[in-house]
Amino acid sequence: MIVIDPSKGGSDNGISSNDILEKDFNLEISKYIYDRLKQLGMDVKMTRDSDETLSNSERINKIINSYGNNSKVIALSNTLSDQGSGVEIIYALRNKDTLARAINDNLKNSNIKVNKYYQKRSKEDTSKDYYDIQSKTGSIETIIVDYGNINNKDEASNLKNNYKTYAEAVIKALANYKGIPYNLDEKDIYIVQKGDSLYSISNKYNITVNELKKINNLTNNNLQIGQKLNIPTSNNQTYIVQKGDNLYSIANKFNTTVDNLKKLNNLTNNLLKVGQILKLDDYINTNYTVQKGDSLYSISNKYNMTVNELKKLNNLTSNNLSIGQQLKIKN
């Protein structure tokens, strides 16, 4: 369960520089993240989906009231700055750095500059978070992503042209953190960064250089910074290894086998490292927990399945469901 908060809005424009108005950028990237998380089958809401004025208290209430004061909920606040350099990720004092670190790593892997990920304490009371959205949201895991300094022309240009690349780094971290298989948007576009090559880009998206050249009608290996490349849809989904994971637990989680995981990832032993990216079978199943108000029709519709497929996959003989019941979902 994710609540996305585009900061600013309405009468609060936020900062403005280099043709970027903060409230508009925050909303644009938030909507993109919202749509992609929904596409991946995640339960997600937004504090605002239009140019709406929200006070701090209204914003906080929307986050808490979305799902209640639930520690399993993640609130993502998207914002910008007018100083410093690079992305900053701020996680609450009550939370571990796991998600913040994953976002940091994904951004760096996409050749995006990250300044740091950290916790920020109130100057008046160092036992509390600096930001209300973290100090006043109870046990909800709240993370703030500051995408960079728009007073810096290079950073502003990068944000305008590559905001989807920034967003995908966050999306992938959220999906893996929640145990939801991540795959790229079918219409994914990559914008060439400094230091990129066809080999590094193809390796990043688990395709061959020839495939990348073919889909983009490239006749040589030359690339230009800012060049847009179409990325073919990948059937492979990925999972980032977490502390305590092993091949058996991951295979069991995604209803596959240890042998399949090893074969798909060219593993010669059972050793794993925290942060390691594993490819998953494209036919894997994941689990869905039945919520209040769910029906077989609403769940099957959400995951682009038929009711009969859902019943067959779960050996159901009737249409009755119980809150908390675990259902296998075909991805």
Image (cartoon, rainbow, N blue to C red):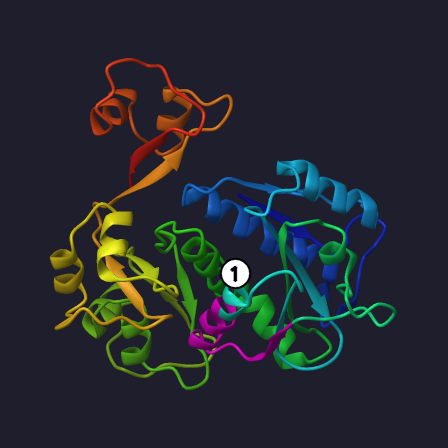
Q: Residue at x 22, y 45 (%)?
A: 255
Choose top left, top right, bottom left or bottom right for residue 315.
top left
Dot 1 alpha-carbon crowd within 10 angstroms: few under 14, some 14 to 19, many 20 or more: many
Residue 271 x, y percent position in the rendering:
22, 72
When the figure is inspected, residue 165 is found, relative to residue 82, above or below; the finding is above
When the figure is inspected, residue 167 is found, relative to residue 284, above or below; the finding is below
Residue 59 x, y percent position in the rendering:
76, 46
* Residue 48 seen in the current view: no
The three-letter amino acid code for the residue at tag 1 is: Ala
Q: Secondary structure at mark 1?
A: helix
Q: Is residue 219 magenta?
A: no
* Region rendered in magenta: 102-118
Give left or right: position of 117 versus 128.
Answer: left
Q: Residue at x 22, y 74 (%)?
A: 209
Residue 223 x, y percent position in the rendering:
36, 81
Give left or right: position of 11 versus 207.
Answer: right
The total of numbered circles placed on residues is 1
Residue that label 1 marks:
167
Residue 56 x, y percent position in the rendering:
82, 50
